DNA sequence: ACAAACTCCTTCGAATTCGAACTACCTTCG
DNA sequence: CGAAGGTAGTTCGAATTCGAAGGAGTTTGT
């Protein structure tokens, strides 16, 4: 008999892949607790506030937010709904484009952001920034930026995918 | 009047933070399409199969899987349910510990894994591996590993977090 | 030996996510 | 102009996620 299905092992240079996913998940998990505790915000909600807070004078469109967060548009609609209900952001119809909606930070949202940010910065520092010395941090930033550019430039022309919900394993051969 | 709520900007060294989250999300997104299309697997499902396939002779406990995927236990239960229903994995009660459950790759699961892996490797290569030359890839792996160690070692002693569901912004001051 | 404390996993309900379909608006191009 | 094709957001249903609570088995301390 032959070996019991030789493990289709991944090439050794794929260590980066797992390391990346793991670290990202760990950092997010570390940060979530603090955001929930001090601002009752989900991570996505926090990010929306943070982006809107970057420059209050230039509001962000839904699409812009979704792209920056790498989030679906419908998912973003949901979260902006939540934030708007809570009075933390405001939806303003775009002037130039009748279809567009701009999201701006409401005063209450700015207040929450101010309240949460110091602790957030603290946690990120503990978890991520303090893991590395200055040179390594700079290097990591550079490498990640390089990957991001590569991926972004590659993301044109993709075929549609089958929807979720069928039995796992049922893909084409 | 004072400036309109001075932006509580993040310290400059936090670029890593955003870069990390963004790259990770982009890579995952890139990979998901292929997994869905060729194996009808979610990313988590694929990871479960892949881990179980690493070494078929030593089965993985639910907890071990959850930890490696940085996933909640209940979430893992759900996904293993799906995979088991589809006949891709098998749950085997642990012999040593009556509470434990071991997950092993079923033949059908191994087949799916073999079918999906080549394409998966291809996508990861395009998206991530090919972004960097050999030296940079090695360096990135090293840096991520360093962060992972740091985070893992730090993740003892954390206070419980309030549950989700309250109005965003309602945290303590 | 027994109880307290802990660990493993599942169940449960609620929140979040996504893709597909849809409405409305904008932009081309004939 | 008017239709075709594209873009911005939302709605909708289904899938996935999580944390809290619970059932069992295990370990520890006395």
Image (cartoon, coloured by chain):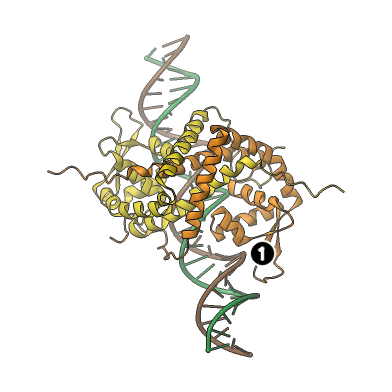
Chain colours: A yellow, B orange, C brown, D green
Query: Is A116 on the left or on the right of B107, as rendered?
Result: left
Residue B165 lies in what quarter of the image?
Answer: bottom left
Residue name at image x 34 percent, y 49 percent: A83
Furthest toward the right, the residue is: A1
Image location of residue B98, percent across then percent down? 67, 72
Residue name at image x 54 percent, y 33 percent: B132
Question: Is residue A70 among what the camera can see?
Answer: no
Q: Is residue B128 above or below residue A40?
A: above
Secondary structure at badge 1 equals strand
Residue name at image x 74 percent, y 53 percent: B106
Image location of residue B147, percent across then percent down? 48, 50
Image location of residue A102, percent across then percent down? 32, 37
Residue name at image x 72 percent, y 37 percent: A173
Image location of residue A119, percent across then percent down? 33, 55
Q: Which residue position is annotated with label 1?
A: B101
- From the viewer's side, name the closer residue of A141 and C12: A141
Furthest toward the left, the residue is: B1
Q: Is residue B153 above or below residue A49?
A: below
């Amino acid at each position: 008999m032959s070996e019991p299905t030789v493990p289709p092992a991944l090439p050794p240079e794929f260590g980066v892949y797992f390391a990346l996913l793991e670290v990202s998940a760990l950092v997010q998990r570390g940060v979530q607790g603090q955001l929930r505790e001090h601002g009752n915000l989900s991570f996505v909600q926090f990010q929306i506030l943070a982006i809107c807070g970057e420059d209050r004078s230039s509001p962000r469109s839904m699409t812009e937010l979704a792209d920056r967060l790498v989030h679906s548009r419908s998912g973003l609609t949901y979260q902006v709904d939540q934030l708007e209900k809570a009075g933390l952001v405001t939806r303003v119809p775009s002037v130039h484009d009748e279809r567009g909606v701009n999201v701006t930070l409401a005063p209450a949202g700015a207040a929450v952001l101010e309240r949460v940010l110091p602790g957030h910065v603290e946690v990120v520092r503990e978890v991520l920034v303090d893991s590395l010395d200055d040179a390594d941090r700079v290097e990591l930033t550079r490498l990640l930026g390089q990957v991001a550019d590569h991926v972004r430039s590659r993301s044109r022309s993709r075929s549609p995918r089958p929807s979720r919900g069928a039995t796992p394993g049922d893909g084409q051969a």
